[in-house]
Image: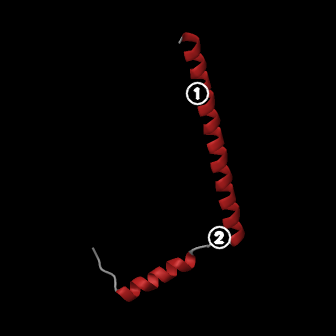
Amino acid sequence: MALTNPLQFIQQVRAEVAKVVWPTRREVVLTSVMVFMLAMFTAAFFFLVDFLIRKGLQGILTMFG
């Protein structure tokens, strides 16, 4: 394993960070809103599925119980 000079390492890190394309504020807001909306949609979907399964099982148990 080759050791890198600390000064060389810092220069390499700065060069790599300079290559990063940072998102704009608008992109961050839009993606955050989309993640929130999809999380809410997923929560509503699983709530509905759980509700339907629970009601179905209650109906079956009531008929035979």
Foreground pick, 43 / 17: 43
The percent position of residue 57, horizontal first and vertical second, equals 57, 21
The residue located at (68%, 55%) in the rendering is: 34
| Horizontal side of residue 27 vs 9, given as left or right | right
Q: Earlier in the sequence, mark 1 or mark 2?
A: 2
Foreground pick, 61 / 20: 61
Residue lying at the far top of the rendered structure: 64
Of tags 1 and 2, the one toward the viewer is: 1
Foreground pick, 48 / 25: 48
Name the residue type under label 2.
Answer: Pro
**How far apart are labels 1 and 2 at the CA level?**
44 Å
Residue lying at the far left of the rendered structure: 1
State which quadrant residue 6 falls in: bottom left
Numbered mark located on residue 23 in the image: 2
The residue located at (60%, 38%) in the rendering is: 46
Label 1 sits on residue: 54
Secondary element type, mark 1: helix
Name the residue type under label 1.
Answer: Arg
Q: Residues within 10 Å of mark 2 (few under 14, many from 20)?
A: few
The residue located at (39%, 89%) in the rendering is: 7
Q: Quadrant of the N terminus?
A: bottom left
The percent position of residue 45, horizontal first and vertical second, equals 64, 39
